[in-house]
Amino acid sequence: MRRIFRSRAVGAVLALALVATACGSGDSTEGEPITVASFNFNESVIVAEIYAQAMERAGYSVERSMNLGNREVVKPALESGEIDLVPEYIGSINGFLGGTPTADSQTSWDEAKALFEELGVTLLDYSPAQDKNAYVVTAETASANGLTTISDLAPVAGEFRFGGPPECPEREFCLLGLETVYGLEFAEFVPLDAAGPITIAALEGGDVDLALLFSSQGVIAEKGWVVLEDDMGLQPAENLVPAIRMDVVDAYGDDLTTLLSEVSVLILQDDLTEMNKRADIDGEDPAVIAGEWLDENGFPAS
Amino acid sequence: MDEGSQLMVWDQAVAFLQDPTTWSGPNSIPFRLWQHIWISVAATVIAVVLVFPLALWLGHKRRGADIAGAAVNIGRAIPSFGILVLTVMLLLELGVSVLSPWPVLVALIALAAPPVFTNTIAGVQGVAPSTVEAARGMGLTEGQVVGRVEMPLASPVIVEGLRIAFVQVIATATLGALVAWGGLGRFIVDGFSQQNQGKVLVGAFLVALLAVVAEVGLTLVQRASTPRGVRID
């Protein structure tokens, strides 16, 4: 706890100092290169590439620091100015900053933005596309038991084996929430991996009946699996959102933030799932996928 | 680690040990201990069945020193986790259930085989040629030479190979939890994910305890299996 507090205080002081020195520059694409970073998984790299290439196509100078690591690594790097821009998830960053993430995107975004600005980082407009915990069954299981929502699991949960990451039984947004919010008691919880190959194989092979995956994973569509609707709003919203240092915003002005927000709001759920499939399953280069998305969405390479 | 977090680990460990689900059910210490022991015993026994006869024959023929050397080097060079991940991927491709014990079992057999193989060859080849010649001179058949002279004299070295293999398998079976299998590694992997360091501590302690018990137990067997005539003490 003490360490977190101290790093926040240092971040705030740093941010103030940098904001103070950055005052006075106007709207321009000239200036220090903007360092775009991503978390260490394909989806994050793709979206970071979309941000990076959109800025490059508009004439900004960009540097990349892709696959940097998890949030424990990325957030301090963003606060210290080692990186300037990263695709975040509104629920996760809200919770990480000590807020209370909710199923409502706007509320979660408002709170996360206010908390992050204390550390010299702001959030731009969020994408409709989300990546959150998804409770997934096979098409056969769904039709045999008439499942479309999580609530529909009530009569069959006692016979179902539920597989997810080992931390799931202790998490509000996972097994604990399914038990308390939905009143579900499963026959067994099977510890697997974090929506990785083992979970996918276990659901496909019938070793588990219900599995925790991520909503934007390409494998769900590829296998024709069914994501059960979170009808009681257990999962916090996890829209993608550009998180950018405020001194960079001040240095470059509204043109930059308008551009990034315009790009962000165009990233739809289907786009994200399809791009993830191309990277995760077909092994395509995230940079190429991102470039094609920009071509198709009105940000052509000049 | 400051004083506060040490206390927290201790409190977590105590809370974990006081939880009734720790002592009965599918994620309890007795069940995970049983899983850990049976897969370790099974892997070692299967490894012995697979490689012991060949090693005995090679040793008797005084051949295979090169093969033994290569086997032990390969066994040392390949990381246990690498073998485990490789067998998981391979068996998944073959359609084996991801939750079955097979991926872990196959990986552990592969780890147990080299020490059994090399020690058996080395043990049999280590029997003095003059002793073997004397046995032949007394009219023993080749089978009798192996069964009554070479195997008893080589048994301390053979049992040592068994002991090395078994202790290594017990330690490595812990990794099975990383590929969704059970065993005592479950407490370490789950505790780590759940930020419950107390659970990690209990799991690590149990694995260490089991390995020490196996080590001591097989050392006693090794001493007992040494023919009285060649005992040093």
Image (tube, helix red, strand yellow):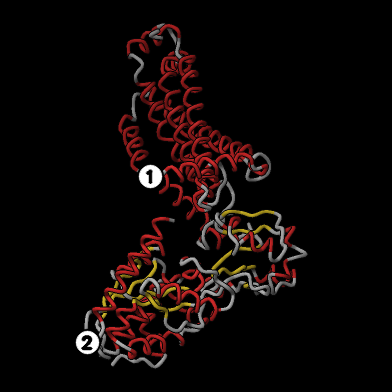
Mark 2 crowdedness (10 Å alpha carbons): few <14, some 14-19, many ≥20: few
| Residue B18 as seen in the image, left or right of residue A43 | right
Q: Which residue is at 52% across, 48% downward?
A: B196
Query: Is A278 left, or right, of A138 in this rendering?
Result: left
- Considering only vertical position in the picture, is A152 above or below A198? below
Q: Amino acid at mark 2?
A: Glu
From this viewpoint, is residue B113 visible? yes
Do the residues at pointers 1 and 2 share their chain?
Answer: no
Mark 1 crowd level (few <14, some 14–19, many ≥20, 10 Å Cα): few
Q: Which mark is residue B125?
A: none
Of the 4 image quadrants, the one containing the N terminus of chain B is: top left
Q: Chain of mark 1?
A: B
Label 2: which residue?
A30
Which residue carries the number 1 mark? B79
Task: Identify which residue is drawn at 38% across, 9% down.
Answer: B232
Q: CA distance from mark 1 to mark 2?
A: 51 Å
Horizontal and vertical percent position of residue B146: 44, 18
- Image quadrant of residue A120? bottom left
Please report, as a chain letter, where disc 2 is located: A
Residue A273 visible? The answer is no
The answer to whether the residues at label 1 and label 2 have Cβ atoms under 8 Å apart is no
At label 1, the amino acid type is Pro
Asked which secondary structure carries label 2, the reply is: loop
Q: Is residue A206 above or below residue B160?
A: below
* Badge nearest the viewer, 1 or 2: 2
* Residue B16 horizontal side relative to residue B73, left or right: right
Left or right for A190, reference A26: right
The location of residue B40, given as percent across then percent down, is 53, 36
Rendering quarter of residue A53: bottom left
The number of discs equals 2
